[in-house]
Image (cartoon, grey):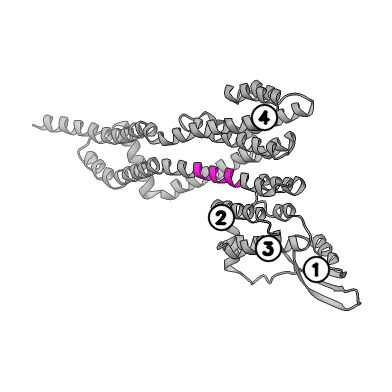
Amino acid sequence: MPVFKYRAFDKAGKTVEGTIETVDEDNAIESLRRKGLFVANVSKETKSIMSFDLQEFIDNIMPVPQKDKTIFCQQLSTMIGAGLTLTKAFDVLEGQTRNSKFKRIINNVRKDINQGNPLSLALARYPAVFSRLFVAMVHTGEVGGGMDQLLNRWASFSERDEELRSKMKSAMTYPVVVLCISFAAVFFLVTFVLPTFVEIFKTAGVTLPAPTRMLDGLSILIRKRIYLLFGGIVAFIVGFKQFKKTRKGRFLLDKLKLKMPIFGNLVYMMVIGRFTRVFGILLASGITVIETLEICKEVTNNVVINRVLDRVALNVKRGGSISKPMADSGVFSPLVTNIIPVGEETGTVDKLMIKIADFYDRDLENLIRNLSSVIEPVLLVVMGGMVGFIAMSLILPMYDIIKVVRRGM
């Protein structure tokens, strides 16, 4: 956070000068007034252009690990449940945290609390670390009580979500390694082996078939004009990122994620599982349906799903139901659209949403467990296709050489 220099007067009229670390100038003035000071001047402290703090730079570019945030939440929940004050709890948390960036943030939050700011406001100043969902649950705990239970719910959700992500990464490790090795082998064959054979074919006066000419062109591009290849790759990446930033591009890409073979079903289960679980947790915490839907949009992080949630929010504002816009969209499965109306009639939407999330999480775990066996046939086809194409490119000219040799005999 920025540092502000200040000059003020205490109640006795004595001049007080110093620095205060806070979000902005208005907050600095308000904090000083709470201390009983009459502010004369406040200005932001500027760093020298030549000054450079390597540790601060590394902290800024490195995110706080999700595991650290989950542990933080569990420990805070335990200490609040044991009756510790927030100031004391954050003192303990700061001492136990090893991540330097997170330690500094916890220290700043503690300072904000000491200055009289509510915990939710202090946490909201770090959106890259504390999600809107987490801040909303803390605010609900401040207003209605039971913060330790709410924090415990969030920690359970976070731990479950991280566990699923970890399992997915583990399941994807094998296919990614196999593909990398395959492409490395193809690169070696095309770059170093193929040119020798092509030279032999040309010396023998053989007309190269189309597959061989294609690979020979790729080999020349890699060996002699690799800058064009890298330039094309960079241009594609930049163009893809720009396309992804557009509304239409983001919509098409998010739609593609849900429609992809094999992986589309996996992404859908993860997105809907997260949405239903967060929706149920927030409703059970006393947050309104409209605010819950708005927060869930950040959790799903999918434009296709979020457009449906916008229509649901609009329908609820008009006095309508949650389930009808979902059913009309064709995006949500019958499991979701058939169970939610029951919850609306019985007043148990929050509980049924969490049950739906449990169902999707079980299915997702089974799919992740069997992912390798599903992907292996696809990998075999891809690898077989690449090897077969290279083999055909080398074998076809050899037949022509044999014909030339037979004619010479």
Label 3 sits on residue = 88
Q: Quadrant of residue 171?
A: top left
Q: Main secondary structure of the magenta part?
A: helix
Three-letter code for the amino acid on which mark 3 is drawn: Lys
Three-letter code for the amino acid on which mark 1 is drawn: Ser
Q: Which residue sits furthest left?
A: 409
Position of residue 15 measured from the top left corner of the image (x, y, whole percent): 86, 78
Name the element at disc 3.
helix
Q: Nearer the viewer, mark 4 or mark 3?
A: 3
Label 2 sits on residue = 68
- Of the numbered discs 4 and 3, the one sitting upstream in the chain is 3
Name the residue: 46% across, 41% down.
Answer: 168
Name the element at disc 2.
helix
Question: Is residue 284 something that shows in the picture?
Answer: yes
Q: CA distance from mark 2 to mark 4?
A: 32 Å
Towards the viewer: 374 or 203? 374
Side of 6 relative to 301 (left or right): right
- In the image, which residues are magenta? 154-165
Q: Residues within 10 Å of mark 2 (few under 14, many from 20)?
A: some
Name the element at disc 4.
helix
Name the residue: 68% across, 31% down.
Answer: 309
* Circles 2 and 4: CB atoms closer than 8 Å: no
Residue 196's disc number: none
Quadrant (top left/top right/bottom left/bottom right) for the N terminus = bottom right
Three-letter code for the amino acid on which mark 2 is drawn: Asp
Q: Which residue sits furthest bottom?
A: 14
Question: Is residue 333 something that shows in the picture?
Answer: no
Q: CA distance from mark 1 to mark 4?
A: 51 Å
- Of the numbered discs 1 and 4, the one sitting upstream in the chain is 1
Q: Residues within 10 Å of mark 4 (few under 14, many from 20)?
A: many
Q: Residues within 10 Å of mark 1 (few under 14, many from 20)?
A: some
Three-letter code for the amino acid on which mark 4 is drawn: Val
